[in-house]
Image: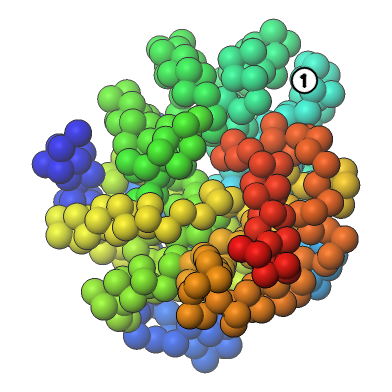
Amino acid sequence: MDRREFLKRMGVGAAATTAVLAGCDSRNNPVTGDKAAQGDIPTDKMTYRTNPKTGEKVSLLGYGCMRWPAVSDDSNAELDQEAINSLVDYALAHGVNYFDTSPAYCKGFSERATGIALKRHPREKYFIATKLSNFASSTWSRDASLAMYHNSFKELQVDYIDYLLLHAVGMGEGMKEYEARYIDNGVLDFLLEEREAGRIRNLGFSYHGDVRVFDHLLAQHDRYHWDFVQIQLNYLDWNHAKEINPRNTDAEYLYGELVKRNIPAVIMEPLLGGRLSKVNDHIVARLKQREPDRSVASWAFRFAGSFPDVLTVLSGMTYMEHLQDNLRTFCPLQPLTEKENAFLHETADLMMLYPTVPCNDCKYCMPCPYGLDIPGILLHYNKCVNEGNLPESRQAANYREARRAFLIGYDRSVPRLRQANHCIGCNQCVAHCPQRINIPKELQRIDNFVEHLKQGTL
């Protein structure tokens, strides 16, 4: 697809006129969580998109409930329900009405926390999206899958679900796993009946992994009538997803296939698990030079939100400052201009010169049976790459300082008993990674790197 066709499909310059508006202020306001600052953000400017099936207005910023705050930094800490309630209240007050959760999120407690927070508000004020997250083979039976489905109603305290997804089709063994989870046991037929009965208002799927599954499900659209599909889309994955990992699929293809069939797209990973807000310092400088008052993250959200067939863009907002920054981007959304779009594509090309491990911190790989903090290891390495603090050779002028900073930071970020040298290569984590990272290989590479640093032999 050339640039002209891309812009035509993207609807640059036109998306703003078709959006319904309602929450936020200029980017110059300070991003804080105090009540005074909250008062600076109007509540009537949120950009909405229309669900073509129901005619309902869905906020272009959707709340991803994968990263709810906990009461402490301890990995076993309970979710902070009071903080979650405050975030939900603030989001609703500023126009956010789409909340995306799953039985698998937050160690199984996201649905419950989300349900508690939303139950305090009128049901017609929000849309709940959840998933049939029957990843484990022990949940593939009809009874186990239906028990998970019914439990979602209980945890969310609802009698209907607005958006129900087959979760992460294409993972694991591709078509074989998809058929075991949803076809052989009759579960998809059951969900179609539930949609007909009104207990599911919209039925779709989220896609990761084997593109043959994605293509197969779209080929069955006349039979299943998918109401929406959730895909990974951001300015790096638009043309570079397969380059980063051969098992991935470029977002350009995924979005284009949905547009052909008039299926609304729900966007996940607009920030690649935060990686597009923590880019290399050179990229930060490039973005800030162009728009000094915009956050780095806002560029990625504007990219995802500028596509006219996108229904909502999900963001896992753990803290009030994340929520407020994103509200400023979507209240209202300023779609990318042609020049800004070209600028972001050039930025993506530059980012490919600074390779990081494509970890989105989703924690699907956890818990590790041998106690490793897999995301912590990978994210510390990525942080050092992005900040330019990776000691690359003993000849480098800053080698001694960078070596010391990396090792000290590694020990502070990841307890020693949970570091990469304890990986035995059991490969249990690999099947659970939506990005299909060869995690043991990356851990071995990082461990070798750390050992060379310790011995000064890099």
Q: Amino acid at mark 1?
A: Trp
- Residue 94 showing in the rendered view: no
Q: Quadrant of the C terminus?
A: bottom right
Could you tell me which residue is drawn at 70 percent across and 72 percent down? 407
Single out the residue that lies furthest toward the left. 4
Q: Is residue 314 left or right of residue 338?
A: right
Helix, strand or loop at label 1? It is: loop
In terms of image quadrants, where is residue 10? top left
Q: In the image, residue 421 lies at what x, y percent? A: 80, 54
Q: Residue at x 80, y 16 (%)?
A: 141
Say which of 455 and 277 sits in front: 455
Residue 151 lies, in percent from the top left, at 80, 36
Q: Would you say residue 441 is visible in this rendering?
A: yes
Q: Is residue 146 left or right of residue 30?
A: right
Task: Spot the residue most to the bottom.
Answer: 36
In this rendering, the answer to whether 116 lies above or below 208 is below
Taking the image as shown, residue 242 lies to the left or right of residue 286, namely right
Q: Is residue 110 above or below residue 284?
A: above
Q: Nearer the viewer, residue 305 or 381?
A: 381
Q: Is residue 90 above or below residue 224?
A: below
Image quarter of residue 104: top right
Q: Quadrant of residue 59?
A: bottom left
| In front of the other: 93 or 355 | 355
Which residue is tagged 1? 140
Residue 368's spot in the image, x, y percent? Answer: 82, 46
Residue 62 location in percent, x, y? 49, 54
